[in-house]
Amino acid sequence: MSEAAAAVKTVELKILRYSPAKDDKPTFGSFEVPWTDDMSVLQALQTIKDTLDGTLAFRWSCRMAVCGSCGMMINGKPQLACNTFIRNLPPGPITVEPLNNFPIERDLVVEVGGFVKKIESIYPYIIPKEPKTVEQGPYLQTPAQMAAYESFSDCINCMLCYAACPQFGENPDFIGPGAMALLQRYNGDSRDGGQKLRLALIHGEDGVWSCTAVGVCSDVCPKHVDPANAVNQNKTNSALDFFLSHLPGAAR
């Protein structure tokens, strides 16, 4: 063996494999992969798919921690595979599993239909307070008004917060931290007038009051969105709306 070959570093990846159509239960497969200091877990998975097992299934797209596609459990923690580097992990084996709290579609791919419905349900767009014609010009806001919601607009829908959320794990109908962060992005926008439409989701049995305030959703967020803060703001808004609705003369 040459000195160059002897110097090649390798790492073992233990990957959960499961195809519901043919497997009774998930099992782990083991792969030995050569790696360099600039190699991400996503690149290791691509190496496995390209050279060792072409049947391995996982999602990915941008490779720059922007699209949110490659979320998975890496050594038991929800992380983006493209933004998790082998050099920063303990010596192998590295365990790679699909995101917790979601049904497995195949291998590292989870079903996202329920999550998409939650996002759709919160009216994820600006509903103008007052319609304006093109001639009347754009809807304006100050830098301070933008700062009130800007951090929540950084969510990339990676679902890591849902994989970490114990309440979502117990109750899949819980609206969850990601949807609440996106909801607050629009509720906090000075140009938006759709707050009343979103109140039913906030007040509801599976709304913000189901949150047990563990806060781990914010710990795992790769974009520092702080969904726990969004949940707390919506709890405040929900309580205020309930209080105001019981004042004398309040509209019923």
Image (cartoon, rainbow, N blue to C red):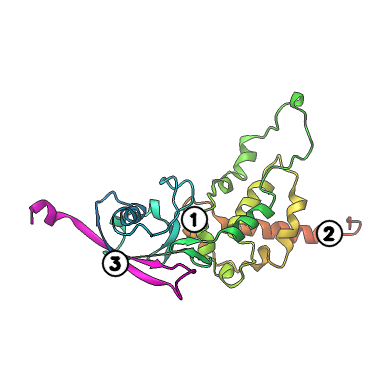
Say what amino acid the circle numbered 2 marks: Ser
Camera-side residue: 50 or 91?
A: 50
Q: Which residue is under mark 3?
A: 93
Q: Which residue is under mark 1?
A: 221
Q: Is 6 colored magenta in this rendering?
A: yes
Mark 2 and mark 3: Cα distance apart in space? 57 Å
Q: Which mark is residue 51?
A: none
Q: Which residue is under mark 2?
A: 245
Is residue 192 shown left or right of residue 59? right
Q: Quadrant of residue 147?
A: top right
What SS does tag 1 mark?
A: loop
Say whether disc 2 or disc 3 marks the residue closer to the N-terminus.
Answer: 3
What SS does tag 3 mark?
A: loop
Magenta segment range? Answer: 1-29
Q: Is residue 235 above or below residue 212?
A: above
Judged from this view, the residue extending furthest toward the front is: 22
Determine contact: label 3, label 1, CB under 8 Å.
Answer: no
Determine contact: label 1, label 2, CB under 8 Å.
Answer: no
Say what amino acid the circle numbered 3 marks: Pro
x then y, percent, for residue 87: 28, 55
Camera-side residue: 35 or 134?
A: 35
Q: Residues within 10 Å of mark 1 (few under 14, many from 20)?
A: many
x then y, percent, for residue 170: 58, 73
x then y, percent, for residue 14: 33, 67
